[in-house]
Image: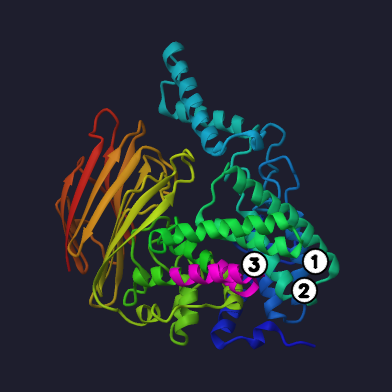
Amino acid sequence: MTQPMVKKMSEEQQHLVMQSMDMMDRFYDEEFGLLRSSGEESSAHGTRGSAHYALGLLIRQKSGDVERAVRVLHKVLDYQYDAPEEIYHGTFATQSTDEHPPAGHYAWKSFAPGTAYFLERTFEKVSEAFIHKLQEENNLLKEEADVKQLRQLFYASVHGVLPPVWISYDPNWREFIACVCAIASAAFSELLPDALIQRMDEAMERAVQGSVDRRLSDAIPMNTNIELMHIFITHYYGHRLKRADWMQHADEQAEGLLHEFEQYGGTFAEFNTTTYYGVDLAVLGMFRRYAFTERMTEIAHRLEHGLWNNIALYYNAKLENLSGPFARAYDMEMREHSSIGVFLYLLLGKGYEHLTGMNCESGHDPMIALLGIDVPAEAVPYFQAHQGDRLVQKQFLELCERDDPKANRNLCTASAWIGENRMMGAMSGSRNTNGQMHPATIHWQTETGERYYLRLIRRETGGDWNSHLRGITFEAEVTPDSLNIDVQLDTAEEIEVYFEIKGPSIRHQDIQPERWELPGLTCTVKAEAPEPTMLMYTDYAEIIYRYVPGKSENRMRFELGISD
């Protein structure tokens, strides 16, 4: 009997596998055959997380693990959508409780690129025109609550007929689950029954074809992490299933991505992003281990080393974090919603276990342990110790996934000042509607080791920052002791532009309109903006500047002078 994969791994790799599997074991529902989505009593079960769990079981191979993995993979495949004419063909329900997306009303293959964008914009305009007519002609909808309720009813009706991306289905589940199936078939085929191997191959034929159709139509653009997965699964299954058209497609896509990456000195459209860089590194590891051709291996090698050099450039070893600005980010802390700390632990080894704390990405850890790392020698010192204060600047060509495909690529500049105990980031050129774009950031640490961050974000009043909002742009610039930001607001919505400051012992009385006396940092503020209001929470504060259309100037400017 062959030795389990985990027994062949380094101490660091084994730590990642066992820690992650202990967590996922607690969420496994023996009766249902999948992981509960959240909490041990959840009624919903997730497909992507369960697929990663199955891969972890194949790596660990404790008694009963292989049999459980087989069951889980069969169960995940049960949730694939088999609908060849629909835009969601070959993807998977994200949760066991998802309703099947509407079918039969969306001839998406015959539409132009950017279909999802144009439909969304059209429905927005129809909704606003409909509400306006009710208000003006029938003297109805006097209350804002009535307007919001009617808008919700309108969109609910639309979404019951046409499948709204990200609402009724997630197209990216094709790529995520296909990557797991590829690794399972490449590394563990001798452990899996022939019936499961055959079923996975049949399911992957649907998934890859759906992914290729999506890419060729450009109906829903692919961000970098999805683009990399798309190329990998098309390459892998093209060779595995002897599909010459997929092989050619993957080769062309890889060459195009490499050209764009190197055009601006080695940058992805999804630039400086802790969450998605973790996915990128994992997929490049898949190429390193399982690519079929020398050229594909070479391309992945150049991308992987270039990506590590970018991470090193914006990394602060003292703060153990990446500096902003972030093209896309959920959190300002690298160890939240990210696997970057896991990769760094594999590089740095014993003593850095704290970088591997559990977060929502930890289900990927067994896969990362299996794939390993390939860090270029010149990048390694940046992760071991601070390599001197520096002002860094990189350009990248962003992707605005919800904009007109003829105008959804913009040349951006991500600038950062990285000192030993403080780093700041500033973004210029971006026109992204995504709230995950963080245009102005500060991270710092006090003499006693307490860590803080500041970020500028926006939200519709009463809404959430992690949303798509049109007509709001930021232009920021940074020096070692200043951070200046211009905000343009060309929108009919009421918007809150606000600084979020997070860390211990922040006091209301220390934050005044023109001076913020924060632990370890003093910030003088010149603001051309409405008078701010402030909200205090347990460990963070919000300094809010509210834009009201017709009453406020549609431009704000902030000049922050920074001293330690």
Picture residue at 64% right of the left edge, 36% below the top? 108
User: Closer to the camera: disc 3 or disc 2?
Assistant: 2
Nearer-the-camera pick, 405 or 64: 405
**For residue 164, above or below residue 506:** above
**For residue 204, above or below residue 169:** below
**For residue 216, above or below residue 248:** above
State how far apart marks 3 and 2 are (Cα): 16 Å
State how far apart marks 1 and 3 are (Cα): 17 Å
Nearer-the-camera pick, 192 or 304: 304
State how far apart marks 1 and 2 are (Cα): 7 Å
Q: Can you see residue 363?
A: no
**Left of 543 or right of it: where is 96?**
right
The residue carrying mark 1 is 197
**1 and 2 marks in contact (CB < 8 Å):** yes
Q: Amino acid at mark 2?
A: Ser
N-term mark: 1 or 2: 2
**Mark 3, secondary structure of its residue:** helix
Q: Which residues are magenta?
A: 282-306
Q: Magenta stretch mostly in which secondary structure?
A: helix
Q: Amino acid at mark 1?
A: Ile
N-term mark: 1 or 3: 3
The residue carrying mark 2 is 189
Res. 287 image quadrant: bottom right
The residue carrying mark 3 is 52
Image x and y of residue 203, in percent: 76, 56
Res. 298 image quadrant: bottom right
Image x and y of residue 59, in percent: 68, 78
Picture disc at residue 131? none
Quadrant placement of the N terminus: bottom right
**For residue 560, above or below residue 220:** below
Nearer-the-camera pick, 312 or 488: 312
Q: Is residue 86 magenta?
A: no
